[in-house]
Amino acid sequence: MLLMNKTHRVFLTAEWRDLVMLNYEVDPALLREYVPPGTQLDSFGGKTYLSLVGFRFLNTRMFGKIPIPFHRDFEEVNLRFYVRRKEEGEERRGVVFIAEIVPKQAVARIARLAYGENYICLPMKHCTEAVGPGREVQYQWQAEKQWCKLWAQAEGPAVQPGEGSREQFIAEHYWGYSARPGRDCLEYRVEHTPWNVWTCTEAGFEGDASAIYGAELGRVLQRRPDCAFIADGSPVSVFTGRRIA
């Protein structure tokens, strides 16, 4: 894992747990308008992926020390895709978020100010259940009086993704990139240990997400995912960002 120099301060620490990751193969043209300057679309096996991800934020602290009253534990659902960027010979593989949903207004406001991310505050709920060594997990949010849901079921023990696997490609990204209209691109580092994953026996999305993501992306989510898994998660550190372009 990369060692950060002293100019990169920890902005936030937390635990990310019970991650449901629904992954859809898409035409690269569908995502090009969202690609931040200074980065380029990444692919796995020549295929471009869009992911709908739900997870739990736990023990959230600002600057690694300061808890926000009533804002330590909450859900998040985000729609994301994958980019890469070279920096001094290093290939940095990162994530771009199209929209992120949380149930806490203060969390959404801080993230918009600090990183320029498209955070939306909506009512949310979740359910997680251990079924033997497997898992059943779902996340829901309410938009325009309708509840949307992503869910997954998995059997067997969680294992480390295989080296060079699609699951490893999707789960192991340690950079985030955001581009605000008319402004430059922000790059920030996210540190965590590699996650164990369960391959899903069943998974999907239910509802109409077009009001948040637009008609084209909303239609993608109506399909059966091309790949789905649940990750156990870990403690994470999110560092302050820097402008790159």
Image (cartoon, rainbow, N blue to C red):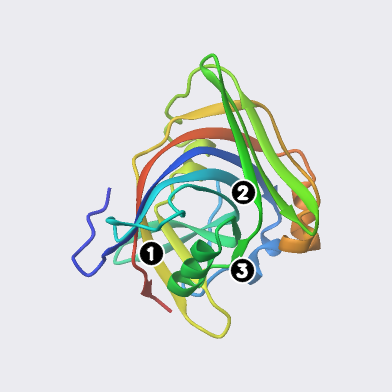
| Label 1: which secondary element | strand
Give whichever of discs 3 and 2 has the lower sequence position: 3
User: Residue 46: x percent and y percent?
Assistant: 60, 48
Give whichever of discs 2 and 1 has the lower sequence position: 2
Q: Mark yes or no: residue 45 visible.
A: no
The quadrant the C terminus occupies is: bottom left
Residue type at tag 3: Tyr
Residue at the spot of label 1: 188
Residue type at tag 2: Ser
Q: Please, is residue 229 above or below residue 185 in the view?
A: above
Mark seen at residue 51: 2
| Label 3: which secondary element | helix
Residue nearest the viewer, comparing 115 with 58: 58
User: Residue 21: x percent and y percent?
Assistant: 59, 41
Name which residue lies at 39% across and 58% down.
68
Q: Please, is residue 238 above or below residue 197 in the view?
A: below
User: Residue 111: x percent and y percent?
Assistant: 48, 66
Q: Identify the residue at the far bottom of this view.
A: 182
Residue nearest the viewer, comparing 50 with 188: 188
Residue type at tag 1: Tyr
Q: Quadrant of residue 151?
A: top right
32 sits left or right of 36 in the view: right
Residue at the spot of label 3: 34
Name which residue lies at 42% across and 35% down.
195
- Neighbour class for label 2 at 10 Å: few (<14), some, many (≥20)? many
